[in-house]
Amino acid sequence: MSRVGVLVLGPAGVGKSTFCNSIISHMQSIGRRAHIVNLDPAADATQYEFTIDIRDLISLQDVQEEMNLGPNGALIYCFEFLMNNLDWLDEQIGDFNDEYLIFDCPGQIELYTHIPILPTIVKHLTSQLNFSLCATYLLEAPFVIDRSKFFSGALSAMSAMILLELPHINILSKVDLVETQVAKRELKQFLNPDPMLLASDINEKTNPRFAKLNRAIANLVDDFGMVQFLPLNCNTKDDESNSVANILSYIDDVTQWSEAQEPKDPKEDFDPEELEE
Ligand SMILES: Nc1nc2c(ncn2[C@@H]2O[C@H](COP(=O)(O)OP(=O)(O)OP(=O)(O)O)[C@@H](O)[C@H]2O)c(=O)[nH]1
């Protein structure tokens, strides 16, 4: 028995749910199957139904109303409730053996960068439920090509990577919104960026007082070696299937999906009646 899980992470509004739907529709188009597990207690309905939905356990609106909490406090309450009821998740996932599950996570990145809620769920999925997991971390392309924002995005991605301790794929979403030729050329530079070069560019424009700090941050990102991004465009059909196919091949690779598939006995698909027709 093996299960593959893909965590879809990133700040609010970067396109996580859209990406989940795009993976499902791409997989369907190539004859594969996957399910969405919604881990966002405040989620809206999406194109594909959630196979497993945290809102069946607890919803943000109910918690806000009943506990008189604001949205962030209520979100933490929902996750603490989930942590205390992990047998609910076990039960929901129980029947999904040899399946591909895509976990759409909330955009509040504090859940994996500041408090150990998602790391605990990750440990449970890998050690108790036998998942081969990988994390995808989305950042918006138009945001990242602003050099100083690139570093803030890269640091948040690194923080998730360190806390979750999972194979990690960085993605630049909404590349279609990078429109001018100059910006498109820049974008290429950001898919495989050289942090030291970017720090020099920043230092030309910012107060010299920050030069040392900028270089130190660039060194950190550079040393960590996590500076690759895959482009994602969910806005136009052709680009969507190309970029999603590319990302999926990376996910399959790191989760060793094909190796995890048990060789099928060809006799299982054999229908003797077909021969008689
Ligand atoms: N132009 C463009 N827009 C996109 C793309 N992907 C998503 N969007 C839009 O970005 C907005 C946010 O997308 P969502 O998928 O809801 O983002 P999210 O990260 O799930 O949002 P939260 O769950 O609130 O954190 C929606 O209006 C999408 O239509 C893309 O590739 N290109």
Image (cartoon, rainbow, N blue to C red):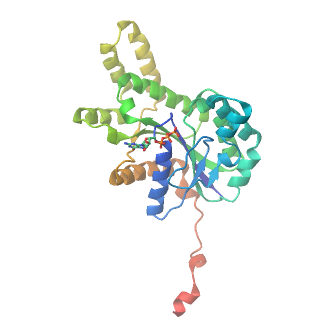
- Residue 18: x, y in percent? 47, 47
Please state if 25 lies on the left or on the right of 39 as rendered: left
* Quadrant in which the N terminus appears: bottom right
Q: Farthest residue in the bottom direction?
A: 276
Residue at (52, 90) in percent of width and height? 275
Residue occupying the far top of the picture: 209
Numbered circles on residues, count: 0
Residue 6 vs residue 68, the one in the foreground: 68
Q: In this rendering, would 202 be left or right of 17?
A: left
- Which quadrant contains ligand 1? top left
Please indicate, yes or no, whether residue 44 appears anywhere in the rendered image.
yes
Across and down, in percent, residue 113 comes to: 59, 29
Which is more toward the observer, 55 or 213? 55
Looking at the picture, how far across and down is residue 259, in whole percent?
A: 55, 57
> Residue at coordinates 37% horizontally, 45% vertically from top-left?
233
Residue at left offset 45%, top offset 28%:
153
Residue 248's place in the image compared with 276, above or below, is: above
**Residue closest to the eye, 167 or 181:** 181
Query: Does residue 192 appear in this view?
Result: no
Q: Picture quarter containing residue 216? A: top left
Position of residue 147 measured from the top left corner of the image (x, y, whole percent):
36, 24
Would residue 144 appear left or right of 251 to someone viewing this image? left
In the rendered image, the vertical position of residue 226 relative to residue 102, given as above or below: above
